[in-house]
Image (cartoon, grey):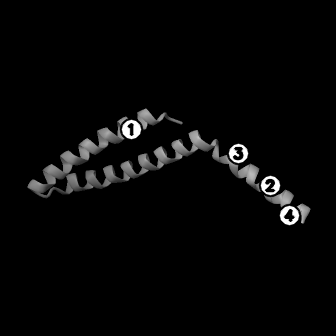
Amino acid sequence: MRNLEAIHAEIEQLTERRRELWQLLSQAHDAALADELHALNDSLDALWAEHRETRATLRFGDRQRIVARARTEERLERTAA
């Protein structure tokens, strides 16, 4: 798991490149630049998802442990009922 600062740095770098691509595409359409922009947007979406996941892990703990604990509690409740 990467730290939030590293993720933010990469997001900022890709956002700056996206701004440059929009600038170039506003002057004239280029299919290669449009494809790069599309790939860049996908990368940014993935980075923001990683950012949210990292924040949640830092705040609440490991996801697998939380799910395992919830399933255990659910089984105990069913057994007790």
Q: What percent of the width, then of the height, locates residue 60?
A: 62, 44
Instruction: Report helix, strand or loop for mark 2.
Output: helix
Label drawn at residue 73? 2
Query: Cβ–Cβ below 8 Å for labels 3 and 4?
Result: no
Q: Amino acid at mark 2?
A: Glu
Identify the residue at horizontal 64%, vertical 41% (top origin).
61
Tell me which label, 3 or 1, sits earlier in the chain: 1
Pointer 1 residue:
8
Q: Residues within 10 Å of mark 3 (few under 14, many from 20)?
A: few
Identify the residue at horizontal 53%, vertical 46% (top origin).
53
Q: Amino acid at mark 3?
A: Arg
Label drawn at residue 78? 4
Measure the C-alpha gap from mark 2 to mark 4: 9 Å
Instruction: Report helix, strand or loop for mark 4.
Output: helix
Pointer 3 residue:
65
Q: Amino acid at mark 4?
A: Arg
Identify the residue at horizontal 38%, vertical 48% (top origin).
43
Q: What percent of the width, then of the height, locates residue 6?
A: 42, 33
Measure the C-alpha gap from mark 3 to mark 2: 12 Å
Measure the C-alpha gap from mark 2 to mark 1: 36 Å
Q: Residues within 10 Å of mark 2 (few under 14, many from 20)?
A: few
Identify the residue at horizontal 28%, vertical 45% (top origin).
15
Measure the C-alpha gap from mark 4 to mark 1: 43 Å
